[in-house]
Image: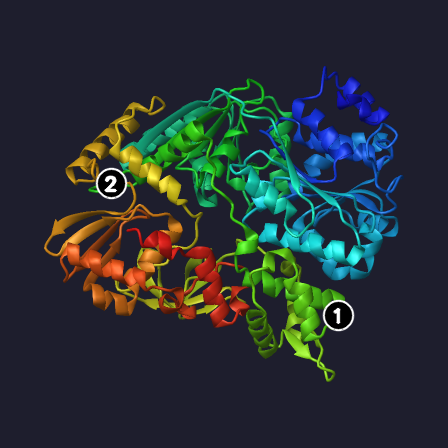
C-alpha cells in the first residue's frame, strides 16, 4: 500500500476527508511517481480522482518528503528552488476550479500555488517572478506570453522544474494548441536547462498508445499508462426524433421541457445560436405553464462573469436548473451532480459524446443522456442526423471506440511554424538563418518540415516585412512582425470565433464566422452571394449577387466526421438491428429509411463493405452515396468541381444534398463515369487539385503563408486521396 509513502500532511488531509482508502489509480500513481522516471498517462472516467492521483505524490516530492519515505523523491534531494510543477489546463475556468481544489492541500505543505492567466491579478504574477517556487497553473496562451515577454525569466522560473501536468490531454491532441504546448515545453527545457516528467490526465481517450506517444514526443523518456481498466457502467439512453415543421416544432420544445423539468440538466448543442434559441423557447414554454425561470446559458460569446455565475449556480445550488451549453461545459469543471444530459442533434464526434456523457451520473453512478433531433424535411433523402447519432452511440457502447487524434509529428503545420518563428525571434532576438532554422525545426512537431520549405517561409516573411535582415546577415523581427507579436491575440494559435461582416457595396448584409475562398459563395439572408474580396485584418468580406447553384457554396467549418462513423451509418442502414433506446417516431423513421435503402439497392448483400453506393435516377442522372469521412468527401468534391475533371467526366450538374450524398448529371453513362473517376484518382496528386486562392483560411495564420506552403498544409490536414479513391 503506497498510502504510507505520502507526506504526513497529505495523509492527514485524506483522513479529514474521511476517505476509507485510496482508489486504484491513486495508489498506482504514487508508485509510478516515486519509483519511476517515465512520463505518466492517467486515463480514467470523470470524477475518478485523477487530479488527486497526480498531485498527492507530486506535492509529496515538492515538499521534500518522498525521498524520506523510501522513494526516489526529488532528484534534487530538497525542495525545488524554482517552480517545481507546471499545470497546463485548456480553460481559465478549469484552472480556477482546480486551483480551489488544490489550495488547501498546497497550503498544508507550505507550497505556493500560482494562477497565471488573463484574469489573474498582476500583483500575484509579480510575486511569482520575484520568488519562483511551488506550482504554477497556466493556459497555453499565457505560457506563450511568458516565453515571449519574459525570456530573461525563464531559467529563473523553471531551472528546477520537475513535473508538467497536462489536464484534459484529449482536448489538446491533434490540435494546434496541443502542438503549441509541445513546442513550449521544448523551448522551456532548452532555455531553462530542465528535463521535467510529464503527467497527462484524460477521461476521453480511445487509443492510449497514441496519447502516450504524444506525451513523450520530443523527449528521451517513455510514457507509462495508469488506467482504471474496463469499467462496466450502466448507461441510460433515449433518442427522440421530430421533423422540422411548424406543426411539430411546438411539440419538440414541449417534449424538451418535460425532459428537463424539475431536474438538474445540461442541454448540449452544436452551436451558440442553437443554445440561445433553445433557452428562449424553453423559457416561453415555462412561462405558459407558469413555471419558474430555471434556465441559464453558457458558451464562448457570453462574458466571463456570466459564465462564472452559471458555473457557481450549478456547483452550489441543489435546486432544479437547466443550462444550455456548447463545448464550454465539456471539460472537468466542477458543476456538481447532474440528473441528466440532453444532446440536441447528433454529437460532433464519438469523443464529444463520451465527454458529455461523463458529466452526468456522479451521484447515481449511472450516466443518463437524452438525445433529441429536430430534423429537416426529408423528402427523398435519408435521416442522416438520426443515422449519425445511432452510429456514434453504437461505436462507443459496443466497442469503446473513440476517434484517434492524429500524430502532430506527421503533419505539416506551417501556420504554427510561422507563429513559433516570430515568437522565438521576438523573444530571443537576432539569429542567423541557419541558427534560426536549427532552433525552430528541432521543435518536435516540425520534424516533417524540410529546410527548403522553411527557407520559403522565411522568404515570404521577409517580403511581408514580418522579419528583416541585418547588415551582418542576421534575422530580426520586422516592423510588421513587431505589430503582430505585441498584440495579445498573437499568444493563441487557434482561430478565434470573431465574426466577419459581409458587405455588398456599402450595405452590411450580416455576419458569418468563417472566411470562405475567393470566388466561392455564401448564403445569407436567403440569397446566394459570390465572394469578391476578403479582408482578414478588418474582418470584412465583400460580395456580389450570384445565381444559386452557379458556384460552390462554402458553408464554413465544422468538426470532421471520421470514416468509421460513416461506415457504421452504412451498416445501420443496411442492417436490421433494433435499438431499444429509440422512441417510436425514431424507430419508425429508421425502419422507413431501411425500406427505401433496400428499394434503391443500397442494402444488397453483395454490395462491397467499402466503396460508394451508386443509384441511377434516369435521364443521365445518378446519385452517389460515397460513404466517406470528411477528408475523403472533401477530396472527392474537389475532383468533381475541378474544371478539367468536370470535362473528362462530362458533368453538367452537381448538387451536394448533404455530407453523405451527391446528385450528379453527366453526359457519360454511370458505368463509364465510374471508370473515368477511378482513372483520375489513380494519377491524382494534390498539386493538380488545389489552387491557393480556393483554399479556406482555417488555421489562424494561414493568411501569411506562401501559396505553395498553404497548399501543402491543406492537403496534409484536410484531404485524403486514398480514401476518396475508394468511391
- Would residue 288 be found to the left or right of residue 293 on screen? left
Q: Is residue 435 visible?
A: yes
Q: What is the x, y in percent for residue 483?
A: 66, 70
Residue at 82 percent across and 21 percent down: it is 12
- Would residue 661 be found to the left or right of residue 104 on screen? left
**Numbered tag placed on residue 378 in the rendering:** 2
Residue at 65 percent across and 75 percent down: it is 467
Crowd rating for badge 2 (residues with CA inside 10 Å; few <14, some 14–19, many 20+) = few
C-alpha distance separating marks 1 and 2: 60 Å
Establish if 287 lies above or below 562. Answer: above
Q: What is the x, y in percent for residue 674?
A: 21, 56
Give SS at disc 1: loop
**Numbered tag placed on residue 429 in the rendering:** 1
Residue 561: image quadrant is top left
Nearest to N terminus: mark 1 or mark 2:
2
Give SS at disc 2: loop
Establish if 459 lies above or below 612. Answer: below
Amino acid at each position: 500500500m503506497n498510502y504510507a509513502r505520502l507526506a504526513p500532511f497529505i495523509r492527514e488531509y485524506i483522513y479529514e476527508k474521511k476517505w476509507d482508502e485510496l482508489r486504484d489509480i491513486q495508489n498506482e500513481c504514487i508508485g509510478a511517481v516515486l519509483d519511476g522516471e517515465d512520463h505518466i498517462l492517467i486515463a480514467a472516467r470523470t470524477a475518478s480522482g485523477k487530479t488527486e492521483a497526480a498531485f498527492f505524490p507530486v506535492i509529496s516530492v515538492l515538499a521534500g518528503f518522498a525521498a524520506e519515505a523510501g522513494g526516489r523523491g526529488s532528484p534534487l534531494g530538497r525542495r525545488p528552488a524554482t517552480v517545481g510543477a507546471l499545470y497546463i489546463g485548456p480553460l481559465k475556468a478549469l484552472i480556477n476550479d482546480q486551483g480551489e481544489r488544490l489550495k488547501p492541500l498546497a497550503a498544508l505543505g507550505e507550497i505556493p500555488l500560482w494562477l497565471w492567466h488573463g484574469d489573474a491579478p498582476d500583483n500575484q504574477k509579480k510575486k511569482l517572478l520575484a520568488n519562483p517556487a511551488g506550482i504554477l497553473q497556466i493556459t497555453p496562451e499565457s505560457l506563450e506570453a511568458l516565453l515571449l515577454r519574459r525570456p530573461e525569466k525563464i531559467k529563473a522560473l523553471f531551472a528546477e522544474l520537475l513535473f508538467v501536468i497536462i489536464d484534459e490531454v484529449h482536448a489538446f491532441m491533434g490540435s494546434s494548441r496541443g502542438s503549441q504546448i509541445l513546442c513550449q515545453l521544448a523551448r522551456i527545457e532548452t532555455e531553462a536547462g530542465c528535463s521535467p516528467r510529464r503527467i497527462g490526465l484524460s477521461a476521453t481517450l480511445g487509443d492510449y498508445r497514441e496519447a502516450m506517444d504524444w506525451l513523450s514526443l520530443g523527449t528521451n523518456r517513455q510514457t507509462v499508462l495508469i488506467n482504471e481498466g474496463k469499467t462496466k457502467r450502466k448507461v441510460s439512453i433515449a433518442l427522440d426524433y421530430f421533423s422540422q415543421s411548424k406543426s411539430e416544432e411546438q411539440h419538440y420544445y414541449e417534449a424538451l421541457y418535460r425532459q428537463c423539468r424539475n431536474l438538474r440538466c445540461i442541454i448540449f448543442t452544436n452551436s451558440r445560436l442553437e443554445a440561445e434559441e433553445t433557452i428562449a423557447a424553453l423559457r416561453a414554454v415555462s412561462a405558459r405553464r407558469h413555471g419558474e425561470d430555471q434556465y441559464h446559458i453558457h458558451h464562448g460569446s457570453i462574458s466571463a462573469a456570466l459564465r462564472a455565475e452559471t458555473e457557481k449556480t450549478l456547483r452550489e445550488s441543489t435546486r432544479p436548473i437547466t443550462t444550455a451549453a456548447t463545448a464550454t461545459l465539456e471539460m472537468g469543471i466542477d458543476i456538481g451532480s447532474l440528473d441528466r444530459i440532453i444532446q440536441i442533434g447528433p454529437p460532433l464526434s464519438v469523443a464529444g459524446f463520451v465527454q458529455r456523457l461523463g458529466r452526468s451520473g456522479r451521484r447515481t453512478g449511472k450516466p443518463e443522456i437524452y438525445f433529441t433531433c429536430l430534423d429537416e424535411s426529408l423528402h427523398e433523402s435519408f435521416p442522416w442526423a438520426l443515422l449519425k447519432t445511432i452510429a456514434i452511440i453504437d461505436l462507443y457502447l459496443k466497442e469503446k471506440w473513440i476517434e484517434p487524434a492524429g500524430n502532430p509529428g506527421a503533419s505539416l503545420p506551417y501556420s504554427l511554424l510561422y507563429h513559433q518563428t516570430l515568437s522565438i525571434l521576438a523573444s530571443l532576438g537576432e539569429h542567423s538563418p541557419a541558427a534560426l532554422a536549427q532552433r525552430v525545426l528541432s521543435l518536435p512537431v516540425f520534424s516533417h518540415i524540410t529546410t527548403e520549405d522553411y527557407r520559403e517561409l522565411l522568404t515570404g516573411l521577409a517580403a511581408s516585412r514580418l522579419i528583416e535582415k541585418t547588415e551582418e546577415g542576421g534575422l530580426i523581427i520586422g516592423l510588421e512582425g513587431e505589430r503582430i507579436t505585441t498584440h495579445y491575440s498573437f499568444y493563441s494559435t487557434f482561430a478565434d470565433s470573431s465574426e466577419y461582416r459581409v458587405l455588398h457595396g456599402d450595405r452590411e448584409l450580416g455576419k458569418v464566422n468563417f472566411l470562405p475562398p475567393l470566388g466561392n459563395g455564401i448564403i445569407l439572408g436567403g440569397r446566394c452571394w459570390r465572394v469578391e474580396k476578403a479582408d482578414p485584418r478588418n474582418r470584412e468580406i465583400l460580395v456580389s449577387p450570384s445565381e444559386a447553384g452557379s458556384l460552390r457554396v462554402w458553408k464554413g467549418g465544422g468538426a470532421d466526421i471520421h470514416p468509421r462513423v460513416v461506415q457504421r451509418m452504412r451498416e445501420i442502414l443496411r442492417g436490421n438491428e433494433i435499438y431499444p433506446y429509440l422512441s417510436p417516431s425514431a424507430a419508425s423513421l429508421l425502419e422507413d429509411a431501411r425500406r427505401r435503402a433496400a428499394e434503391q439497392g443500397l442494402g444488397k448483400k453483395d454490395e462491397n463493405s467499402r466503396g460508394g453506393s451508386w443509384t441511377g435516377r434516369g435521364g443521365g442522372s445518378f446519385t452517389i452515396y460515397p460513404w466517406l469521412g470528411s477528408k475523403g468527401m472533401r477530396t472527392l468534391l474537389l475532383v468533381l468541381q475541378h474544371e478539367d475533371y468536370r470535362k473528362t467526366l462530362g458533368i453538367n450538374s452537381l448538387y451536394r444534398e448533404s455530407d453523405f450524398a451527391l446528385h450528379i448529371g453527366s453526359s457519360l453513362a454511370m458505368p463509364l463515369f465510374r471508370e473515368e473517376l477511378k482513372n483520375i484518382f489513380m494519377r491524382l496528386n494534390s498539386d493538380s487539385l488545389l489552387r491557393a486562392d480556393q483554399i479556406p483560411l482555417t488555421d489562424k495564420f494561414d493568411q501569411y503563408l506562401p501559396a505553395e506552403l498553404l497548399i501543402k498544409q491543406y492537403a496534409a490536414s484536410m484531404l485524403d486521396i486514398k480514401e476518396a479513391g475508394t468511391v
